[in-house]
Image: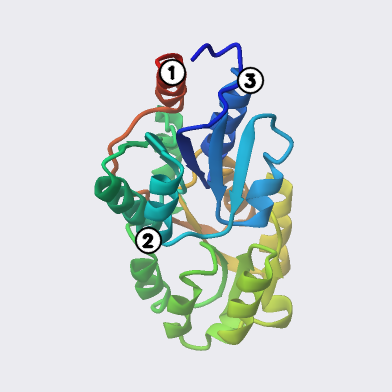
Amino acid sequence: MKTAEWNFQPDILIFAGTTEGRKLAEYASSRKISCFVSTATEYGAELISDLEGIRLLSGRMGREEMGHFIRENGIRLVIDATHPFAREVTKNIQDACAAENVRYVRCLRGADEKEADEKNAPGIISISSVEQAVEYLRETTGNILIATGSRELHLYTAIENYEERCFARVLSTPEAVGESARLGFKGRHLIAMQGPFSEEMNLALLHMTKARYFVTKESGREGGFEAKRTAAEKAGAVLLVITRPEEEGKSLEETQSLIYKHASSC
């Protein structure tokens, strides 16, 4: 295939759930490399809906659905650019690729020395899981601003008087809002907003909730970690950071190069 012309039937499937996923789609489109891009939410699809040559798949897929799509569409290269904490999704993608005998590539979210220093700065506590964060918070007093997503929000119900102490910031989707409300996060204790969030917005929410603790995941530059860190520092809140799991994979730049080489060889 000549990358100056659009390929008729794409054989690349990108699972996008991060800024890196969007950048990969933009790169492919700019090089006239058509590909399928799967996003879990409609909002994710909206971010890349105007890219030429990109065939969008919106909605979550299970392992069997992934395998069926790969098989039926002749996919030869699968790129996993989902969120670092979406471990179940990554496992499903890996299993589907292994079952269909297609190449799997994990695109990693980048980190630098500055981020590592920020994560270990005073006022920051690094913890390996939401469960450990909850155990820590159960021994504390004061309000808590939670920004770790709705999927693990049920774990925070183990905190005594969580309905009064905890404020949950979740995506503004019917699913996230509905599940959060079902768990007891209602009224001013449920903040449904779509990021990214500036330092000013984070600081305003910390002041509004009078939070002594701000719980987030290690999101890196693209996920707004610096804005959260500085806001917590200015508000005098302790920042609890759920650290990213160790992974093996390729950088954004390496993955872009791989896409180009794959398309050029067709």
Secondary structure type for disc 2: helix
Q: Is 41 in front, or is 167?
A: 41
Report which residue position mark 3 lands on: 30
Secondary structure type for disc 1: helix
Report which residue position mark 1 lands on: 257
* Marks 1 and 3, how far apart at CA: 13 Å
* Residue 64: image tag: 2
Q: Is 255 in front, or is 216?
A: 255
**Amino acid type, label 3:** Ser
Query: Splitting the image into 4 quarters, where does residue 246 fall?
Result: top left
Residue 173 locus on image (x, y percent): 68, 66
| Identity of the residue drawn at 67% across and 74% down | 190
Q: Tell me if label 2 and label 3 are in contact, CB under 8 Å.
A: no
* Marks 2 and 1, how far apart at CA: 29 Å
**Amino acid type, label 2:** Glu
Nearer the camera: disc 2 or disc 1: 2
